[in-house]
Amino acid sequence: MTKRRTVIIVDDNDMMRGILRGMLRGDEYEVIGEARNGVAAVDIAERLKPDIICLDVMMPEKNGIDALCEIKVARPETEVVMITISADPATVQQAIQNGASGFIVKPFNAAKVLDTLAHVSARKPSK
């Protein structure tokens, strides 16, 4: 049996975090932490060392792109999937250039979320 991938969910909306958490229940992923903003995301990523972070683009205190940059410097091995309401080309390009592994567009579609995380997980062998 392969090890479950550890995941942190970062979104300033409690309901969005809950929806994602529900989608990730199962044998493949274990949600080990959540955060409401980019400042907390950087901190929790360093402390919990997840395999994957689902990171909202628009958040208070520190946006997702800035948090992405800090997380990838500290933990380049962590896969970061951006969450956004609007996947405009400039945001997508900026995120990819700074190390994002993929995008999930709101509103969430469970099949798309799981497919995106499976694709990201396939890039890195299980521990």
Image (tube, rainbow, N blue to C red):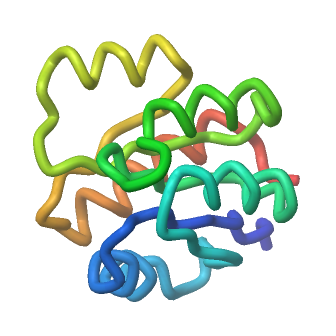
Q: Residue, x 77% and y 66% (percent of image)? A: 2
Location of residue 108 with respect to 46 vertically, above or below: below
Image x and y of residue 119, in percent: 46, 43
Q: Name which quarter of the figure residue 64 lies in.
A: top left
The picture places residue 118, in percent across and down from the top left corner, at 48, 52
What residue is at 56 percent from the left and 69 percent from the top? 35
- Which one is nearer the viewer's eye here, 91 or 96? 91
Q: Work out whether 109 lies above or below 74.
A: below
Residue 93 in the image: above or below residue 78:
above
In this rendering, position of residue 97 left or right of residue 59: right
Q: Is residue 111 left or right of residue 40?
A: left
Residue 68 placement (x, y as % from top left): 56, 34
- Number of numbered discs present? 0
Relative vertical location of residue 43 with respect to residue 65 in this rendering, above or below: below
In which quadrant is the N terminus drawn?
A: bottom right
Q: Position of residue 65 (x, y in %)?
A: 44, 32
The residue under the point 39% across, 36% down is 102
Q: Quadrant of residue 90?
A: top left
Furthest residue toward front: 61
Report the residue at 80% width, 36% height from top. 75
Instruction: Please state if 22 lies on the left or on the right of 79 as rendered.
Output: left
